[in-house]
Structure formats: C-alpha cells, structure tokens
Image (cartoon, rainbow, N blue to C red):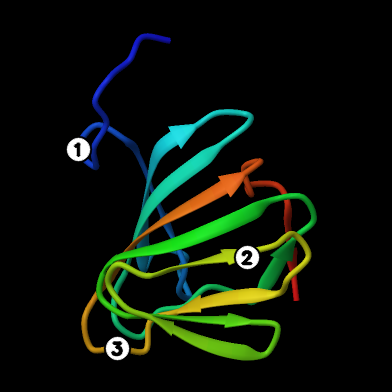
Amino acid sequence: MPTQIISQKSAEHYKWGGPQGTDCDGWHLVKTPELSIIQELMPPGTSETRHSHARARQFFFVLDGELTLEVEHHEFVLQTGEGMEISPGQQHQAINRSKKSVQMLVTSQPPSHGDRINA
C-alpha cells in the first residue's frame, strides 16, 4: 500500500455506544490485521460497556478533554496529553463524565474487534 496522509475526513467512520449504538464516533486511522489505531469522539455522559480482550493490548491517549478509564475496579482520570495502557485480560471501561466531548486515540495490537469479552 502506498504511503498516504490520513485524517478524520478520509478515514473510515463508524458510530458506537449509547442505547442506540450511535452516540460516539470512531475513525479508523490504521486498520490492518496487525494493528488498529482509531480516533474516537465521546460526547459528555457517554460510556462503553465494561469488557476485556483476550489478545489485544490497548493504549488510550487523550487528545482533548477528560476521560475516565475504569480498569479492574480502579478509576483513572486522564487529561489532555495523557494515556494509559490496558493489558490483555484486564476488564476496563471508557467513560466521559465531563461536561465536554473527549477526543482520544485508541491503539490496539492486534486489533480488538472480534476480541471483546463483555463483563
């Protein structure tokens, strides 16, 4: 594949989260069998279902806003410019308790899609 510039405008987009599964946005910046990098937007008051991954190691990095990551029943509040690694098997949940949207990068190796175990 040739080298190319990727952004939200050119990346594959999808909706996730909330009662209808459409409250949050994701953009696949890198989507290969070996690596997934997704830019995500979580509006205020949104969260994902608590879960773990059998194989995927993830890294959450906050681009803008404040993200609460619950990992193994411990809460961590990440600010802009901060990140956290989640090991395979660790139960976790991303939550936006703030009053503004949070933008983040979620890197998964291997990709986490199809590797999710709901708690």
The residue tagged 1 is 9
Mark 1 or 3, which is nearer the eye? 3
In primary-sequence order, the first of circles 2 and 1 is 1
Residue at image position (29%, 82%) is 44
**In the image, residue 103 lies at what x, y percent?**
29, 64
Give the image quarter of residue 5: top left
Dot 2 lies on which element? strand
Residue 34 picture quarter: top right
Residue occupying the point 57% across, 83% down: 70
Residue 58 placement, left or right of 51: left
* Residue holding disc 2: 86
Quadrant of the frame with the N terminus: top left
Name the residue nearer the viewer: 20 or 9: 9
How far is the residue under mark 2 from the one under mark 1?
Answer: 28 Å
- Of the two numbered discs 3 and 2 in the rendering, the one whose residue sits closer to the viewer: 2
Assign the C terminus to one quadrant of the image.
Answer: bottom right
Residue at numbered disc 3: 98
Label 1 vs 3, first from the N-terminus: 1
Q: How many marks?
A: 3
Mark 1–mark 3 CB contact (< 8 Å): no
Q: Nearer the viewer, residue 31 or 3?
A: 3
Q: Is residue 76 above or below residue 65?
A: below
- Say which amino acid is labelled 3: Ser
Q: Position of residue 81 (x, y in %)?
A: 30, 67
SS at mark 1? loop
Horizontal side of 69 relative to 114 (left or right) equals left
Amino acid type for the residue under numbered disc 2:
Ile
